[in-house]
């Protein structure tokens, strides 16, 4: 980070900046005095609040040289990260298909949907117990204990690893005890710092959805925060949780015919900017079963390392998101997504850390 002092700034003003960087953030500075004074801040500057520095007298500009989301940035980690989920690799050259019902509604619905997802060939099963919904009045899932028991039955029935959304820190222990393989942070919680902080302290893979009001920088900062093991004051309190998987799902825009707006160019962009595995969700972005299949293929063609989508045994009767859940088409989606992925690998486009044109190593 570079702090550019205004013309005519006094040595005392420069010293005050250096002192603030040291006392507030524990970082050292180096100063170059020429026609104007430039202060370079050394070390990890993610926690330096540009606004607080700009407030000091004599400061003209604060320029960030490295991304705030250092731990998630490809500039600091060139190789693709591959997260291992009970023997299933996510990221790098792998394509991971994640599917299952939007939420567990009953034992029979969950088990039938799980069998359908397994038959379709998914690698990871959605076992969603509790949900954030667009309206809090909408169906949110079963009570925690009952839902987790069914989630366990879904895993036992299929032998697949699972992903469930965590909406409340107080549920984390129960999730871990139930053996949920991946914890998902939903779009509506994507910036909820207490949840991110808690997940930075556990050794369990996390899928971080893209908040639908967030830009890429905010999303990757949230991911980096889970990875960093640094607390709110910038102190290292643990090693952090490196097992972070991103999932793009579109943002709010003015179109009303689709549920959210998925910007396909975000996929190769995020692959370039971050080394973390990147999935994409065609169900929650498009909101309509008739669109899910092609959007899924588009995500894979654009470089997504996996697809997370809703599969329901009886979408017409679903209590949540039936309109966007696929049924028997799931198998075709999984098969074709794998073909598209393999085809791109065959022409040298999808080859792990080179996927976004970033040299390996
Ligand atoms: C989901 O995956 O079930 C979900 C609710 O997605 P999002 O958080 O992206 O809306
Ligand atoms: Mn849903």
Image (cartoon, helix red, strand yellow):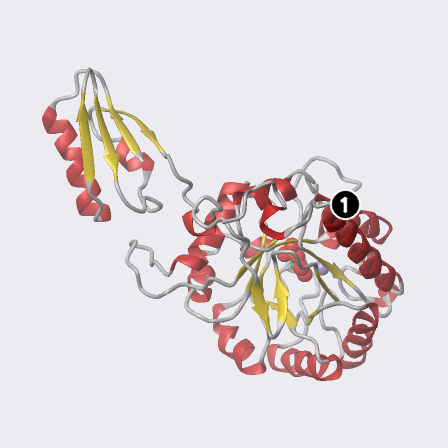
Measuring 53% from the left and 43% from the top, which residue is drawn there?
Answer: 273
Q: Is residue 112 left or right of residue 198?
A: right
- The residue furthest left is 12
Measuring 32% from the left and 44% from the top, which residue is drawn there?
Answer: 45
Numbered disc 1: secondary structure = helix
Q: Estimate the x, y position of residue 106 in percent, counting from the top left.
A: 76, 78
Work out which quarter of the rendered image holds the N terminus and state it.
Answer: top left
User: Which residue was labeled with disc 1?
Assistant: 298
Q: Quadrant of ligand 2?
A: bottom right
Q: Estimate the x, y position of residue 115 in percent, counting from the top left.
A: 81, 76
Asked which quadrant contains residue 109, the reply is bottom right
Asked which quadrant contains residue 236, the reply is bottom left
Residue situated in front as seen by the camera: 118 or 126: 118
Asked which quadrant contains residue 105, the reply is bottom right
Disc count in the image? Answer: 1
Q: Is residue 314 left or right of residue 361?
A: right
Residue situated in front as seen by the camera: 114 or 131: 114
Q: Estimate the x, y position of residue 154 in percent, counting from the top left.
A: 72, 79
* Classed neighbour count for the residue bearing mark 1: other residues with Cα under 10 Å, few (<14), some (14–19), many (≥20): some
Q: Is residue 309 left or right of residue 323?
A: left
Viewer can see residue 294: yes
Q: Estimate the x, y position of residue 103 in percent, counting from the top left.
A: 71, 68
Residue situated in front as seen by the camera: 73 or 98: 73
Q: Is residue 9 left or right of residue 157?
A: left
Viewer can see residue 251: no
Measuring 35% from the left and 45% from the top, which residue is drawn there?
Answer: 46
Q: Is residue 233 above or below residue 172?
A: above
Q: Is residue 102 above or below residue 178?
A: above
Does the beta carbon at disc 1 come under 8 Å from ligand 1? no
């Amino acid at each position: 980070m570079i702090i550019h002092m205004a013309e005519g700034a006094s040595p005392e003003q420069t010293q005050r900046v250096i002192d603030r960087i040291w006392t507030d953030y524990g970082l050292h500075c180096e100063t170059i005095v020429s026609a104007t004074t430039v202060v370079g801040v050394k070390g990890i500057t993610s926690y330096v609040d540009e606004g607080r520095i700009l407030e000091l007298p004599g400061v003209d500009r604060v320029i960030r040289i490295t991304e705030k989301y250092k731990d998630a940035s490809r500039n600091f980690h060139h190789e693709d990260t591959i997260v291992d989920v009970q023997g299933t690799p996510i990221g790098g050259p792998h394509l991971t298909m994640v599917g299952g019902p939007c939420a567990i509604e009953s034992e029979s619905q969950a088990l039938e949907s799980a069998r359908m997802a397994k038959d379709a060939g998914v690698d990871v099963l959605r076992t969603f117990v509790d949900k954030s919904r667009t309206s809090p009045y909408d169906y949110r899932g079963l009570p925690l204990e009952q839902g987790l028991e069914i989630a366990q039955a879904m895993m036992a029935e299929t032998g697949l690893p699972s992903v469930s959304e965590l909406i409340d820190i107080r549920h984390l222990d129960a999730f871990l005890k139930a053996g949920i393989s991946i914890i998902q942070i939903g779009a509506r919680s994507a910036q909820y710092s207490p949840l991110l902080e808690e997940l930075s302290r556990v050794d369990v893979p996390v899928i971080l959805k893209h908040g639908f009001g967030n830009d890429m920088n905010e999303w990757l900062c949230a991911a980096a925060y889970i990875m960093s093991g640094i607390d709110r004051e910038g102190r290292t309190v643990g090693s952090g949780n490196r097992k972070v998987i991103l999932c793009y799902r579109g943002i709010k825009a003015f179109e009303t015919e689709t549920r959210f707006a998925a910007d396909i160019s975000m996929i190769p962009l995020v692959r370039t900017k971050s080394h973390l595995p990147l999935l994409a969700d065609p169900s929650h972005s498009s909101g309509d079963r008739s669109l899910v299949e092609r959007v899924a293929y588009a995500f894979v063609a654009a470089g997504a390392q996996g697809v997370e989508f809703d599969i329901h045994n009886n979408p017409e009767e679903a209590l949540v998101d039936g309109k966007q859940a696929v049924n028997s088409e799931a198998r075709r989606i999984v098969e074709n997504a794998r073909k598209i992925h393999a085809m791109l690998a065959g022409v040298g486009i999808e080859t792990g850390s080179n996927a976004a044109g970033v040299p390996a190593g």
